[in-house]
Image (cartoon, rainbow, N blue to C red):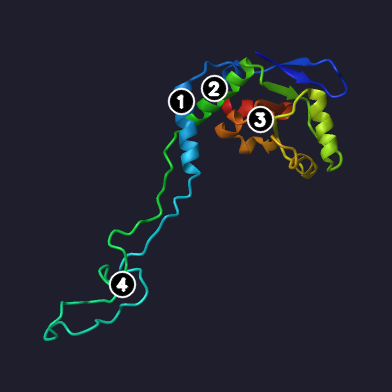
Amino acid sequence: MQLTIHKTGSNKPGKLKVSDAVFGVAYNESLVHQVLTAFMAAARSGTKAQKSRSQARGGGRKPWRQKGMGRARAGTIRSPIWRGGGVTFAAKPRDYSKKINKKMYRGAIRSILSELARQKRLSCVEEFSIDTPKTKQALQRLSELGLNEVLIITDEVTENLYLSTRNIPRVDVIDTREMNPYSLIGFDNILMTKSAIEKVEAWLA
């Protein structure tokens, strides 16, 4: 399979041969949905929490003796039936993550990349570097490529590249280690450097 590659200093794009095992597989919608759902579930914080009677502060002393008071037995003032006491069935932080095998995760990434390539939404560039941290320079590079809403994937995000793109709406830059299903489907176009494609092929092949 071949991808369109934009070469530095040339207005005529070329072709880059890539692995069919990574960029030419059939789209597996159910697998992509399962992996994407698990990825988003793992991002949930699950911070809801309440204190049980053992966690509520105080209540270490028995408020009155067991017998002879004419009142109900009480062992602590932090009982759930007391004001200021703990909660009977206290909520605990919940883990929403779902188990996804590495083979399934890599298969979903391959499926998404292949579908992006078929839809002509995935393009390649020899390199995407910025000399100085200027947003104008980044916009000029993207304009030359005909891209305005794009996720840029490089083998390493430099400081100049990050500073130049952080204020551009609907433009983001990540390295290959941060690539995930959610980021890949969240942009109209994906722009990958040649070195990033080589790293992804070595990971997914």
Query: Considering only vertical position in the picture, is 50 above or below 19?
Result: below
Residue 120 versus residue 6: which sits nearer the camera? 120
> Do the numbered discs 3 and 1 sit on residues whose CB atoms are within 8 Å?
no
Q: Position of residue 109 (x, y in %)?
A: 55, 27
Residue of label 4: 83
The span from disc 4 to disc 2 (Cα, nearest Å) is 56 Å
Residue of label 3: 199
Residue 138 versus residue 203: which sits nearer the camera? 138
- Element under disc 3: helix
Mark 3 or 4, nearer chain start: 4
Q: Is residue 102 visible?
A: no
Query: Considering only vertical position in the picture, is 134 above or below 148?
Result: below
> Do the numbered discs 2 and 1 sit on residues whose CB atoms are within 8 Å?
yes
Q: Look at the image and tell me in which quarter the C terminus lies.
A: top right
Mark 4 or 2, nearer chain start: 4
Mark 1 or 4, nearer chain start: 1
Mark 3 or 1, nearer chain start: 1
Of badges 3 and 4, the one in the foreground is 4
Q: Residue at 32% across / 65% down in the picture?
A: 52
> Do the numbered discs 1 and 4 sit on residues whose CB atoms are within 8 Å?
no
- The kind of residue on which mark 2 rests is Ser
- Element under disc 4: loop
Residue 12, quarter of the rendered image: top right
Q: Residue at 35% across / 70% down in the picture?
A: 56
- Crowding near pointer 1: few (<14 within 10 Å), some, many (20+)? some
Residue of label 1: 31
Per the rendering, the mark at residue 111 is 2
Mark 3 or 2, nearer chain start: 2
Q: Residue at 16% across / 77% down in the picture?
A: 73
